[in-house]
Image: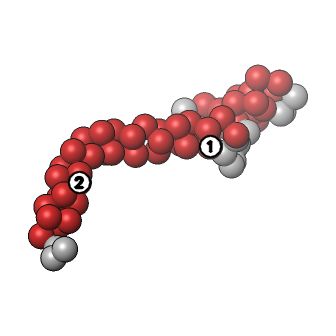
Amino acid sequence: MLPLLVTLQYVTDGKDFIVGRLSREEKGATAVEYGLLVGLIAVAIIATLILLGPKLDSLFVKVKDGLPA
C-alpha cells in the first residue's frame, strides 16, 4: 500500500488533500486512547478482585485464627 501512496503523491505533486492525509503519519496517543487503557485496566482489576476476593478472605481468616490470642 505504501508504494501506491508514494506513487499517488508523486503523480499529484502532493496537492491532493486525500493523498496527503493518507500518507501522513500520526504519532502519539490521544486522550481517547488513554481513557480506553484506563478503562481496560480498571475492568481487569475489578475482575481480579471478584475472582480472588473470596480466596483472599478465607486466607486472612485462616491466618487470623492461627495467631495466638
- Going by the numbered disc 2, the residue's amino acid type is Leu
Image-based side of 60 in relation to 39, left or right: left
Image-based side of 51 in relation to 44, left or right: left
Residue 45 to residue 60: above or below:
above
User: What residue did someone put label 2 on?
Assistant: 56
Can residue 64 be spotted in the picture?
yes
The x and y percentages for residue 44 are: 39, 42
- Going by the numbered disc 1, the residue's amino acid type is Tyr
Query: Would you identify the image quadrant in which residue 14 lies?
Result: top right
In what quadrant of the picture does the N terminus appear?
top right
Q: For the point 15% across and 76% down, which residue is it?
A: 68
Image-based side of 12 in relation to 47, left or right: right
User: What residue did someone put label 1 on?
Assistant: 34
Q: Between disc 1 and disc 2, whose residue precedes?
A: 1
Residue 48 to residue 16: above or below:
below
Bin the neighbour count of mark 2 within 10 Å (Cα to Cα): few under 14, some 14-19, many 20 and up. few
Secondary structure beneath dot 1 equals helix
Q: For the point 27% across and 46% down, which residue is it?
A: 53
Secondary structure beneath dot 2 equals helix
Residue 27 to residue 60: above or below:
above
Report the Cα–Cα distance between label 1 and label 2.
31 Å
Is 65 in front, or is 18?
65
Q: For the point 23% across and 54% down, which residue is it?
A: 56
The x and y percentages for residue 66 are: 12, 70
In what quadrant of the picture does the C terminus appear?
bottom left
Query: Would you identify the image quadrant in which residue 65 lies?
Result: bottom left
